[in-house]
Image (cartoon, rainbow, N blue to C red):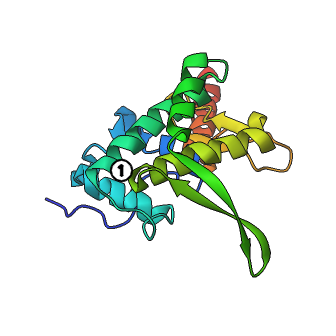
């Protein structure tokens, strides 16, 4: 038996926090895998700890049961909102997560600043991910995309110059699509 990974095993990391949270579920080899549900021999809290580490939140938040429950609530709300921005129920779920924190204006040595405050620190990662989604919606809602592969469930923020990115990863899903098209052409001949 192999040891559980010590780094984030997901195929796509580094997306904006809201999408990165949604991407804690992915489909390797056609089987839905969940970083927070025992993937790769990790306990649920170990998966949470890896996610907090990979997103840079580990220094501010604990990988405990309450944080995991709140993060799962936020993930479901965000997944629904991204899948259907017109879904009023999804918007209500995101708003319910946002109710657990706020932004406090501050004055720093560099000038005006902001600090997030939470009614319970366990809501911190969930609230931060929901707040990130609002930022994406303000800046470029049309650049929030689902991978074009029918067998992929990952989402990404298209930062390409012309806004035509289709795949979560050109090396994985994009390459599979190209290989599939090539195979179909060669079979026709």
**Residue 185 in the image: x percent, y percent?**
65, 27
Q: Residue at x 65, y 58 (%)?
A: 104
Q: Is residue 82 above or below residue 110?
A: above
What is the secondary structure assignment of the residue under circle 1? helix
Quarter assignment of residue 2: bottom left
Viewer can see residue 13? no
Q: Is residue 112 above or below residue 163?
A: below
Quarter assignment of residue 28: top left
Q: Is residue 180 above or below residue 3?
A: above
Residue 175 falls left or right of residue 121: right
Please identify the quadrant where the N terminus is shown.
Answer: bottom left
Q: Residue at x 47, y 63 (%)?
A: 54
- Front residue of 170 and 91: 91
**Residue marked by disc 1:** 67
- Front residue of 48 and 169: 48
Q: Residue furthest bottom?
A: 109
Please identify the quadrant where the C terminus is shown.
Answer: top right
Q: Tag 1: Cα neighbours inside 10 Å, few (<14), some, or many (≥20)? A: many
- Front residue of 30 and 158: 158
**Residue 29 in the image: x percent, y percent?**
37, 38
Q: Residue furthest right?
A: 162
Count of picture labels? 1
Quarter assignment of residue 188: top right
**Residue 137 in the image: x percent, y percent?**
73, 38
């Amino acid at each position: 038996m192999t040891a559980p990974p010590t780094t984030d095993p997901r195929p796509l990391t580094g997306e904006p926090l809201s999408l990165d949270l949604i991407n804690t579920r992915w489909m390797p080899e056609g089987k839905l895998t969940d970083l927070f549900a025992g993937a790769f021999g990790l306990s649920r809290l170990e998966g949470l700890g890896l996610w907090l580490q990979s997103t840079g939140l580990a220094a501010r938040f604990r990988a405990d049961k309450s944080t995991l429950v709140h993060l799962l609530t936020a993930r479901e709300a965000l997944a629904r909102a991204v899948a259907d921005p017109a879904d009023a129920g999804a918007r209500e779920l995101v708003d319910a997560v946002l109710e657990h924190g706020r932004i406090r204006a501050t004055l720093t040595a560099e000038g005006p600043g902001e600090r997030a405050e939470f009614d319970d620190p366990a809501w911190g990662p969930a609230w931060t991910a929901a707040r990130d989604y609002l930022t994406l919606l303000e800046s470029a809602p049309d650049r929030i995309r689902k991978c074009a592969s029918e067998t992929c469930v990952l989402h990404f923020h298209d930062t390409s110059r012309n806004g035509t990115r289709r795949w979560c990863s050109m090396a994985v899903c994009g390459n599979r699509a190209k290989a599939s098209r090539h195979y179909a052409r060669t079979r026709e001949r």
